[in-house]
Amino acid sequence: MNFKSFLLIVSLFFGLYSCASREDHLQEGFVYVQKEIQDIIVDLRYFGTHNFTGRPVVGYEKPVLIMSKAATQALKKVQQDLKAQGYSLKAFDAYRPQRSVTSFETWAKDINDTIAKSEFYPDVDKRDLFTLGYIASRSGHTRGSTIDLTLVDLNTGKEIDMGSPFDFFGTISHQNAPQITAQQQANRLILKQAMLKHNFKEYQEEWWHFTLKNEPFPETYFDFPIK
């Protein structure tokens, strides 16, 4: 065996070991969405700084999307339908560890930390985030079958106009917000109808938020990290 062949075998071994190790930590019943839906677009907002806290969120150790196997299988059908219409799903978040939700609580209690206010909650006093329901101690995301997403036009490569950005705290983000245009409402409807067709249900306060009906872990809030 020559040296190049030896290096190739070693690299393949460690590559396979790395993949196996990464999947070993997953809770049974969960999968990596990008592995199952290879053409989905992912912008994991809480892994970076472009989110309402303005910083990476604890628990997000790698920019990978994790979700229950049942929800991922349903989402794959959604993607297939939308691609036939000239769109692709773009996901911002799916499974979210409980430690991440707890960190949102801690952030919300610090009323002086407002570095991302102008983009994500310009019209909301941070003191009111709990009472208005924008921050809570539990999240459906932690059960593993909820996902936040939008649509990308495959002809332009750009997100379609939904009337408000992802994670914007305000009534304009509600499913049937009266402030948005007819075209923006029609765009939201494309996403909503595709998701509902494949057994997801919408959340009225956030146009981007959908949960699998009959989710496999309806009472369990997981805390394994995203990596």
Image: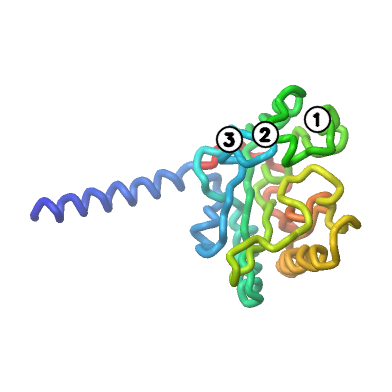
What residue would you read off at disc 1? 126
What residue is at 65 percent from the left and 73 percent from the top?
81
Amino acid type, label 2: Thr
Amino acid type, label 3: Pro
**Residue 88: quadrant of the picture:** bottom right
Compared to residue 51, the image places residue 145 above or below, namely: below
Q: Real-space Cα distance between discs 3 and 2? A: 8 Å
What residue is at 70 percent from the left and 32 percent from the top?
104
- Give residue 86's position: percent from left, percent from top: 63, 74
Q: Real-space Cα distance between discs 2 and 1? A: 11 Å
What residue would you read off at disc 3? 56
Compared to residue 186, the image places residue 23 above or below, namely: above
Dot 3 falls on a residue whose secondary structure is: loop
| Mark 2 burial class by Cα count in 10 Å: few <14, some 14-19, many 20+ | some
Is residue 29 visible from the viewing direction of this image?
Answer: no
Q: Which mark is first along the chain, 1 or 3? A: 3
On screen, residue 174 versus residue 142, left or right, reads: right
> Which residue in the rendered view is the most extreme toward the right?
178
Q: How is the image coloured?
A: rainbow
**Residue 102: quadrant of the picture:** top right
Dot 2 falls on a residue whose secondary structure is: loop
What residue is at 74 percent from the left and 41 percent from the top?
120
What residue would you read off at disc 2? 53
- Choose between 65 and 163: the one closer to the eye: 163
What residue is at 68 percent from the left and 31 percent from the top?
115
- Give residue 189's position: percent from left, percent from top: 79, 66
- Give residue 217's position: percent from left, percent from top: 68, 48
